[in-house]
Image (cartoon, coloured by chain):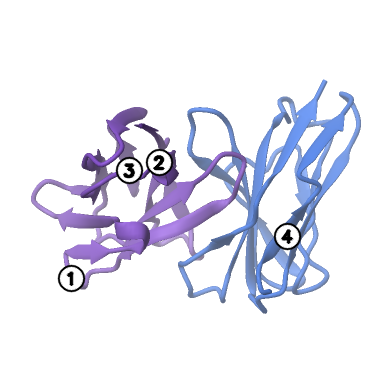
Chain colours: A purple, B blue
């Protein structure tokens, strides 16, 4: 079965410093991986997706993620944090062989950005 | 504007009452999904529908029911059988049964006391 583990429940950064949100995946197939962002009391928005093309994936708002098969990781990064980046971030893997497009969500990482 | 709407944003109910959460989309998507979100947990799938007039149980369907009589609508009923209904409920849609990208509504926060 496919699963993802988000290694940090909370990450705190200062505005203007780099962001790193860590995600490890488990999959016996070549995975499809996603990062979603959720601002407080809002729905989820897709940041970026990896579907076995380029291993470095660029997303919206300056975020990117690198797929590393040898490390089974899909960490999310951004060179310089903005206050507006404060939100919860979910790493997601597509489940295979379920008969439908099932997404499996990590438990989330809350990003706190201080001035 | 194309998108997914959920209403109401906040909902309060007494224990023992059934309550229905609305989800409407004007994206012309075939597939629709309901998720439950609890603090410190990822989203968990309640029900999904790949096409109108068809729906299937997800991972945590007990105490919930749905209908899909129209392509654009996928209401979720939280019944009195749901032991712990207080949560944030999210509806999502996908273009069709082969599309893995899902688009989410803004959510409904249900509080049952």
Instruction: Find disc 1 in the rendering and name its residue.
Output: A54
Foreground mark, 3 or 2, reads: 2
Instruction: Find disc 4 in the rendering and name its residue.
Output: B5
Asked if badges 3 and 4 are on one and the same chain, I answer: no
Mark 4 chain: B
Label 1, residues with CA under 10 Å away: few <14, some 14-19, many ≥20: few
Nearer-N-terminus badge (3/1): 3
Asked if badges 4 and 2 are on one and the same chain, I answer: no
Label 3, residues with CA under 10 Å away: few <14, some 14-19, many ≥20: many
Instruction: Inspect this view and state whether residue B34 appears.
Output: yes
Instruction: Find disc 3 in the rendering and name its residue.
Output: A4
Instruction: Find disc 2 in the rendering and name its residue.
Output: A83
CB under 8 Å between discs 4 and 2: no
Asked if badges 3 and 1 are on one and the same chain, I answer: yes
Foreground mark, 2 or 1, reads: 2
Label 4 and label 2: CA atoms lie apart by 27 Å
CB under 8 Å between discs 3 and 4: no
The answer to whether A7 appears left or right of B98 in the picture is left
Label 1 and label 4: CA atoms lie apart by 34 Å
């Amino acid at each position: 079965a496919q699963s993802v583990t988000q290694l940090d429940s909370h990450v705190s950064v200062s505005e203007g410093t780099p962001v790193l949100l860590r995600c490890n995946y488990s999959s016996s197939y070549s995975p499809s991986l996603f990062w979603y962002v959720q601002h407080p009391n809002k729905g989820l928005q897709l940041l970026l997706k990896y579907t076995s093309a380029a291993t470095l994936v660029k997303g919206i708002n300056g975020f990117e993620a690198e797929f590393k098969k040898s490390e089974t990781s899909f960490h999310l990064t951004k060179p310089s944090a903005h206050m507006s980046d404060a939100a919860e971030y979910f790493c997601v893997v597509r489940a295979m062989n379920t008969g439908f497009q099932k997404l499996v969500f990590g438990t989330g990482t809350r990003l706190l950005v201080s001035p | 504007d194309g998108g997914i709407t959920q209403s109401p944003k906040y909902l309060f109910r007494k224990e023992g009452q059934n309550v229905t959460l609305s989800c409407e989309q004007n994206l012309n998507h075939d597939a629709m999904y309901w998720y439950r979100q609890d603090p410190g947990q990822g989203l968990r799938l309640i029900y999904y529908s790949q096409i109108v007039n068809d729906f299937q149980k997800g991972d945590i369907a007990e105490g919930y029911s749905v209908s899909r009589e129209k392509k654009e609508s996928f209401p979720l009923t939280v019944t009195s059988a749901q032991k712990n209904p207080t949560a944030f409920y999210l509806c999502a849609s996908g273009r069709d049964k082969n599309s893995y990208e899902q688009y989410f509504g803004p959510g409904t926060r249900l509080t049952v006391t």
